[in-house]
Structures are given as C-alpha cells and as structure tokens.
Image (cartoon, rainbow, N blue to C red):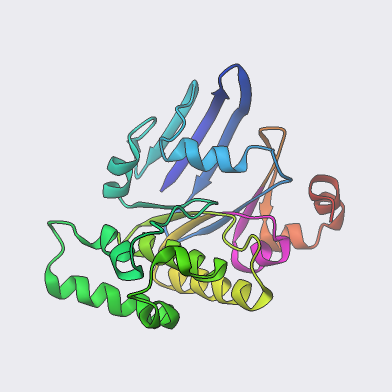
Amino acid sequence: MLALENVHTYYGKSHVLHGVSIRVEAGEVVGLLGRNGVGKSTTLKTIMGLVRPSAGRISFEGQDITGLAPHRLARLGIGYVPEDRRIFRLLTVLENLRTGLDRAEVTPSRRQELLEKVYASFPVLRERRHQAGGTLSGGEQQMLAIARAMMLEPKIVLLDEPTEGLMPRMVAHIREIIDVLHRDAVAILLVEQNVPLTLAVAGRVYIMEKGAVRHHATATELGANAAVIHQYLGV
C-alpha cells in the first residue's frame, strides 16, 4: 500500500534521512523504532509532504505521491497524527472533529455514523464535545487527534509517538484504539519509543539509527532478540 524507496531528506544542509526504504501493506501495522533524533518523525513528515525529499520515491497504492501537498494526501486516504497533536485549541471537540467531516462527498447520515463510531471508541469525547480542545488533558487531546484522523475514513494512519507523556491507563486505551483500527483493516505506520507496545501491536518492525533503517524483522523475531533491542534502542 505505502512504499518508501531510497528516500533522502534534508533540513537545509543537514542530511536527515539516508536512503530510507519502508513498506506497509494493506491492513498491516508496522512499527518504526529508534532513539530520539534518528529521523522517525522526519520520515512521517516526508511521507505527508511536510518536508520534500531530495531523492527517492514514495508511492501509495501504486501512485507516486512524492512531495504531494498534505491535503491531497488526506483525500487519497492517508491520515496523520503528528507528535504535537495539532488540535485546534480554541475550537470545541465537536468542531475539531467536523474539520474531518465537512466534506462534500459525506452525507449528513454518514457524518452522524462516523461521529457515533468515534464516540463509541472515545466516550470521553462525547462527554466533552462542547468543551474547547485546549482545555482537555494531554491524553484526551491525543484521543481527539486520533479521532479527527478517523473522520477522514483513512486507508492508512501515520501515528507519531501517540503514547508520549501519557499515563499507563491512557497508553492502554491508545493500544485498544490501534487494535480497533487494525480490525477495521486500516493500515498503521507507528512511530514509538514504547518498545513493548510496538511489539504487541505491530506485525513487522523497522529500527532506525542515524537517519537510516538498520534492522527489519517481524515483531515476534525482534521480541526474541534482546541483543538487537539493546544495541539500537538501549533497553
């Protein structure tokens, strides 16, 4: 479904991604692990057209999407939940969700169905639907960011550090949502620091170091290889 082939990305003169190649198949959960600053978030930003690669190719369902604008990628079915969530803090929860709902091709009845589906996954958002996004807790804001991406009915979701800074109870809930998306055949590319969570939800895992993919294995194989985990992740 999604493929990066030998992608190089720069920030100014700083060479951040060094020939990154990653594949995500339809309905698959793929983890992207690595220490801070190795290029994981830049990989997602490059996919989403927020940073333009200097070399390489990115394709989605066989179509070359290298450097396409984010709004065009969203229309193709690529959802993105950035590390800093990027919710609209002054808008209510419902207004945030409607930014992904108010599309010409979505009928009023379908909009209500999508809202009800999200509220079933995130009951707290129903309770807080008239509350400003900026007044939510960190965990609730993360839920809102994921829910807003779900409104687009994506074929794949790029999740950047969804559990960062969250309490264990919230981490468990985020895991449940990843499982729900997976059961709905939504593919996921998950960037995380939480190794146990990633190994639990992903089928395959890539490990990055210094802007390049250094290891690729199934989650089961990686979970049984403590030496590799310690070498690249320090845990």
As drawn, 26 above or below 175: above
Q: Position of residue 58 (x, y in %)?
A: 43, 34
> From the image, which quarter does the C terminus lie in?
bottom right
Q: Judge by depth and name the residue closer to the eye, 18 or 115.
A: 115
In the current view of this chain or complex, which residue is farthest to the top? 13
As drawn, 79 above or below 118: above
**Seen in the image, is 210 located left or right of residue 101?**
right
Q: Judge by depth and name the residue closer to the eye, 117 or 126.
A: 126
Please tell me which residue is depicted at 56% across the width and 23% down the height of the picture.
10
**Seen in the image, is 127 located left or right of residue 235?**
left
Q: Position of residue 227 (x, y in %)?
A: 87, 52
Q: Is residue 191 magenta?
A: yes
Q: Position of residue 169 (x, y in %)?
A: 64, 79
Q: Judge by depth and name the residue closer to the eye, 162 or 196.
A: 162
Please tell me which residue is depicted at 36% across the width and 62% down the height of the picture.
148
Q: Position of residue 160 (x, y in %)?
A: 55, 52
Please tell me which residue is depicted at 49% across the width and 72% down the height of the picture.
177
Please tell me which residue is depicted at 18% across the width and 57% down the height of the picture.
103
Residues drawn in magenta: 190-206
Q: Is residue 223 magenta?
A: no
As drawn, 223 above or below 66: below
